[in-house]
Image: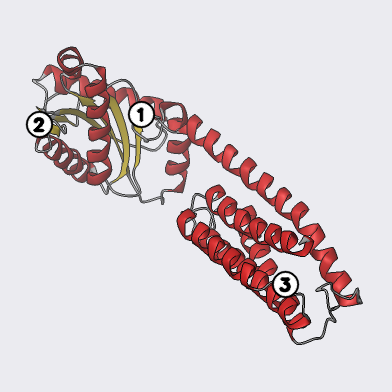
């Protein structure tokens, strides 16, 4: 009875390691499959009850295979998780799970092949290999605990960094981190390269909030952010600059190309009205000011220049692009 409870506890621990590891790394834990597997294990364990040496080996093989399967599935899911390529502690967890599965199988093989001797009541003879195996199993909880705490700390740090650098409504770069990211982008640009700065103002947004409420207004801003991501290059830096203002730094070979990028964005927004699930349709347009990064110009100067041109676009009738301080195109 005591051995049966011990085997069940070992199987349950392996199952919990599988579920906990998957959830910690954001993977699907497949809880129903895990519970069905555990129920099948309990059923088979109930069949193998006679205290003979052969059946005792069978029970050890059964629990070992179940534990190895749980640990192996856990290692596979951790390996496939989003964080495996980004956090060293997640890769360490994957290694620990895989090593534990291998150790369980090796210990099972030693018992089944009678390398490790067994008493008739199912208890193992305390040989040197068995003592070493027990020491390894005994230290495993500490290793898993330290690794899990390391992963939790890394995930928390990542989340705090995201909150500090990302606009929580749209998922774009926040205004707070725009300066740092923009400076890094400009420093990475080749000497012959050029960066266009677009100040993008959503037209008549206050009227949308007044007519439809702030909840719809938030959805509209998310929709605008999605259009910006779709229309601008993947290496662009896109930020939410204010309530209904956005800012984008886009690599461009020159003034003409920068204007084409801004005009294409304006046309895409005009052709992509916001549509809600209940049939609400809200047309939207953009007023865009464009400037190019020049040698010696600061980011503050570029922002002021692009903002001034966005104001000229609004003053000129909205839904247009301005790339100089004289005319609205």
Which residue occupies the foreground of this view, 243 or 258? 243
Residue at image location 68% in from the left, 60% down from the top:
8
Expressed as whole percent of the image width and height from the top left, the position of residue 271 reads 9, 38
- Mark carried by residue 169: 1
Residue at horizontal 15 percent and vertical 23 percent from the top = 313
- Give percent across and percent down for residue 272: 12, 37
Who comes first in sequence, dot 2 or dot 3? 3
> Which residue does the numbered mark 2 point to in the structure image?
279
Residue at left 52%, top 53%? 83
From the image, tell me which residue sits under label 3.
Answer: 103
Compared with residue 269, is residue 202 higher up or lower down, i.e. above or below? above
Residue at 35% across / 49% down in the picture?
A: 235
Q: Nearer the viewer, residue 128 or 50?
A: 50
**Is the C-beta separation of discs 2 and 3 under 8 Å?**
no
Q: Is residue 194 left or right of residue 141?
A: left
Q: Nearer the viewer, mark 2 or mark 1?
A: 2
Mark before the other along the chain sequence, 2 or 1: 1
Q: Does the rendering let one see residue 90?
A: no
Q: Is residue 34 above or below residue 207?
A: below
- Which SS class for mark 2? loop
Rounded to the nearest whole Å, what is the CA distance between mark 2 and mark 3?
59 Å
In the image, residue 116 lies at what x, y percent?
Answer: 83, 81
Secondary element type, mark 1: loop
Would you identify the image quadrant in which residue 6 lies? bottom right
Image quarter where the C terminus lies is: top left
């Amino acid at each position: 009875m005591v051995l049966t409870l011990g085997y069940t506890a070992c199987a349950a621990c392996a199952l919990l390691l599988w579920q906990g590891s998957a959830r910690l790394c954001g993977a699907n834990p497949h809880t129903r499959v895990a519970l069905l597997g555990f129920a099948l294990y309990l059923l088979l364990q109930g069949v193998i009850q006679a205290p003979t040496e052969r059946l005792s080996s069978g029970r050890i093989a059964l629990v070992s295979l179940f534990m190895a399967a749980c640990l192996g599935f856990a290692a596979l899911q951790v390996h496939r998780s989003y964080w495996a390529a980004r956090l060293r502690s997640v890769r360490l967890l994957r290694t620990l799970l895989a090593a534990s599965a291998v150790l369980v199988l090796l210990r099972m093989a030693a018992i089944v092949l009678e390398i490790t001797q067994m008493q008739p009541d199912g208890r193992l003879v305390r040989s040197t290999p068995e003592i070493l195996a027990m020491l390894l199993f005994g230290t495993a909880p500490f290793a898993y605990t330290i690794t899990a705490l390391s992963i939790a700390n890394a995930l928390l740090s990542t989340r705090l960094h995201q909150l500090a650098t990302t606009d929580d409504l749209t998922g774009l770069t926040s205004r707070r981190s725009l300066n740092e990211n923009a400076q890094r982008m400009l420093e990475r640009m080749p000497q012959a390269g050029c960066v266009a700065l677009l100040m993008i103002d959503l037209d008549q947004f206050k009227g949308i909030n007044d007519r439809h409420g702030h909840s719809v207004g938030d959805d509209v801003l998310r929709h605008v952010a999605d259009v910006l991501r779709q229309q601008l290059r993947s290496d662009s830096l896109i930020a939410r600059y204010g309530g209904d203002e956005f800012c984008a730094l886009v690599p461009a070979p020159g003034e003409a190309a920068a204007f084409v990028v801004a005009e294409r964005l304006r046309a895409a927004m005009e052709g992509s009205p916001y549509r809600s699930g209940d049939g609400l349709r809200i047309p939207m347009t953009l007023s865009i000011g464009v400037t190019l990064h020049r040698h010696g110009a600061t980011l503050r100067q570029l922002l002021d220049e692009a903002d001034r041109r966005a104001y000229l676009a609004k003053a000129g009738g909205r839904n247009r692009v301005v790339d100089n301080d004289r005319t609205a195109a």
